[in-house]
Amino acid sequence: MKKHERVLVLGASGFIGSNLVQELIRQGFQVRAAGRNPEKLAQRFGDDVQCVRADVLKPDTLVDALACIDAVYYLVHGMTEGKGFEEREREGAEQFARVAEAVGVKRIVYLGALHPEGADSLHLRSRSATGTGLRRGTVPVTEIRAPIVIGPGSAAFEVMRDLVYNLPVMVTPKWVRSAMAPIALPNLLHYLVGVLSLPDDGDVSYDVAGPEMLNYQSQMQRFAAIVGKRVWIAPVPLLSPGLSARWLRFITSVPTGIARALVGGLKQDLPADDRAIRERLPQRLLGFDEAVKLALSAERQQVAAHDPAHAAVLKRRWRPQFGFYPKSDGASAHIDAPIERVWQEVCRIGGRPRYFALDLLWRVREAFDALIGGTGMDYYRRDPDRLRLGDRVDSWSVAELEPHRKLTLLFGMKAPGMGGLTFELVPDGNGTRLALTCWWYPAGAWGLMYWWAMLPAHIILFRRMVNNIRRLSMRPDDSGSLVRA
């Protein structure tokens, strides 16, 4: 594959996809990134990458995405999409293969998973079935079968990190004794990019692996030693993979669907024979400890890239004990008022309208924060109507401010994690679309429990906040007095 030819990364918003796009750019390829949300992709990759919409379950979106493309990286999975994901994955792969054949794609590179004989994991079976679906077309498919990947954002790595940082004592299911040879992200990227330079031999599959065969328990213990923690792990036979996935929901910030698939794939050893690809694409394989240290050093930059809307805040405030994946909730509404008028009301938060809804709950939370030594009742605003970057609003701080477009307030009360409120305004016909997002990076199990405890209030709070901002913005007078529902 010549480096001036065009490459499409389908599933570019994911952990592997986002890193692969950057690696392909570094090596001189012309890259097109595809996903269901091209606007978010454009935020992440900027002007170096053409970002397009594509959904494998909607063939009409694929024709334009694949136009003038020579090779495609197929990195799509549906683990977070609930029941029936395996059937949707198979259907999507078959539809994609037909469209790729019709438009003249020359090669498909598919990242699958190791699937040893006899493994009954739904996730592993689905990964294999997806590869089979892609091979139903005439476009040659190169399948890379990988174990767990060590890198910031990898589900297996983030589960491990959350467990080690937050649970010094673990009663774990016996699957933690299952062994595999985890591969470092740079090594996997070397293989993924390198296969484009290999001769077209039709459909071919390669196992890839790192240099050390380790069970998950050993990986956690070695990770703990690297970060200066001590962990005590007691595997017991009573915890099934299903129970483990539900338990992980409350212990780690990794999305539940991904955690469930991860656990399901760890029920047995995952051996790999990587001799074929090592002979064709030689490289120095990073050991487990080296891979972990590299991942930890890159984590701050990666978490910011994963959430470009809050990149500036995350780069400044990120801590290793925070979960990589944020929790979020919010509300949005169309407002029949010019964007300048809506912005005026949003910027009064903490002043005359307080927080636009359920002020009593805010007061209770502030009082509790003061009781434990926080600044919850240290009320302050420099100006009642205008905000500047860095301003304090009670215990909050203005972390991001783009006039008439975006305001982010960083949460300042004592809590196990880091979070904030982001208001985004965009023109919407003759009015304004206001979106309010509460985001939270939990610090371990306590951070997750805090989020779940607040969730019932969030269901009511954010919708009322948006509704009251709408009412204030549409008032003929500019008094700023709050109109209650």
Image (cartoon, rainbow, N blue to C red):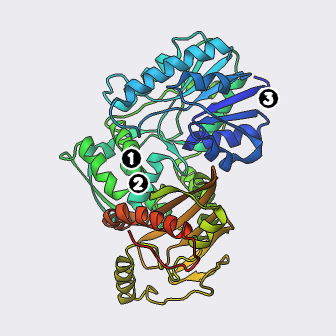
Identify which amino acid the numbered label 1 is placed on: Tyr
Q: How crowded is mark 1: few (under 14 residues within 10 Å), some or many (20 or more)?
A: many
> Toward which corner of the image does residue 60 lie, by quadrant?
top right
Q: Residue 3 shows which numbered tag?
A: 3
For label 2, the residue is 220
> Toward which corner of the image does residue 483 lie, by quadrant?
bottom left
Answer left or right for 471 relative to 243. right
Answer left or right for 195 relative to 477. right
In this rendering, the answer to whether 278 lies above or below 313 is above
Identify which amino acid the numbered label 2 is placed on: Met
Callout 1: helix, strand or loop? helix
**Residues at circles 1 and 2 in contact by the CB criterion of under 8 Å:** yes
**In terms of sequence position, does the residue under pointer 3 or pointer 1 come before the other?**
3
What residue do we see at 62% from left, 87% from top? 382
Question: Picture coordinates of residue 12 (x, y %)?
Answer: 60, 38
Callout 3: helix, strand or loop? loop
What residue do we see at 79% from left, 36% from top? 28
Question: Picture coordinates of residue 415 (x, y %)?
Answer: 41, 75
In this rendering, the answer to whether 359 lies above or below 154 is below
In this rendering, the answer to whether 122 lies above or below 215 is above
